[in-house]
Each structure stands twice: as structure tokens, then as C-alpha cells.
Image (tube, helix red, strand yellow):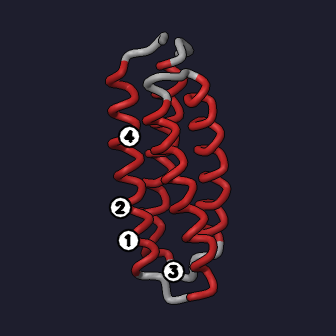
Amino acid sequence: MKGNKSLLDDSERRINECIGLLKEVSSSCCMPERSANMNEAFLKLDSILTELKLARDNEDNIQKSIHHIGELGKTVGFLFATCCTTTREPLYQNMYRIMNDVHGKLYSYLGHSH
């Protein structure tokens, strides 16, 4: 394995923060028809956590995590773009910051950095 395991630990912690933010968004959403997209986002977050745990033994799971982060970004983007209030904007922005942070940590783990 190439990377520093603390990058994986930090990534897991950050994804759990993202789950907390999505729970905040979900619990305050007034449009039940958005539930399917919220559930999809939660499933993608769970997939990222699963891949991060597996990555400790197999580096291929890092690439899968990176892919899931991109997919999550699309789903969160849809939720953000169709949100009926600007009061949740900081929650969405924080989710994007976290996704970007984790993405960078995973590439650093693989030995890529700027």
C-alpha cells in the first residue's frame, strides 16, 4: 500500500460529517418527492465508507471511492439546484468542501499531490 493510513481515517471522519450534513438537509426538506434523491445520496455515502474500509487491504477500493465521490457530487448538485430555499445553501457548500477534501486525501494516499 502506498499511502498513509491516517488519510483514510481522516477521509472516513469527513464522510461521516457529510452524512450529518445530509441528515440536516433531509430532515428539513419540505418536498417528499425529493426523498428518492436523498436516499440515493445516503446510499452513495455508505458506498464511499464501505470502499474506504476495504481500501485498507486493497488499493483498488481507493479508485472506487473516488468514483463514488464524483457520483455523490452529481446527486448533491441535483438536490442543491432544486432546493426551494437558500437557507440550506451553507449545508450543501460544506458537503462539497468535504467531498473535495476527501477526493484530495485519496489522491494523496495514492501518491498524487500538487
Q: CA distance from mark 2 to mark 4?
A: 13 Å
Residue that label 2 marks: 20
Q: CA distance from mark 2 to mark 3?
A: 19 Å
Q: Depth check: 106 or 49 in front? A: 49
The answer to whether residue 66 is above or below residue 19 is above
Disc 1 or disc 4, which is closer to the eye?
A: 4
Residue density around tag 4, few if under 14, some if 14–19, many if 20 or more, within 10 Å? some
Q: Depth check: 31 or 68 in front? A: 68
Residue at 49% x, 53% y is 46
Does the CB distance between marks 3 and 4 fall below 8 Å?
A: no
Q: CA distance from mark 1 to mark 2?
A: 6 Å
Amino acid of disc 3:
Thr
Residue that label 1 marks: 24
- Residue 74 percent across, percent down from the top left: 67, 55
Q: CA distance from mark 3 to mark 1?
A: 14 Å
Residue that label 4 marks: 12
Q: Is residue 114 visible?
A: no
Kindly state the secondary structure of the residue where label 3 is placed.
loop
Sequence-wise first label, 3 or 4? 4
Amino acid of disc 1:
Glu
Residue that label 3 marks: 85
Does the CB distance between marks 1 and 2 fall below 8 Å?
A: yes
The answer to whether residue 2 is above or below residue 96 is above
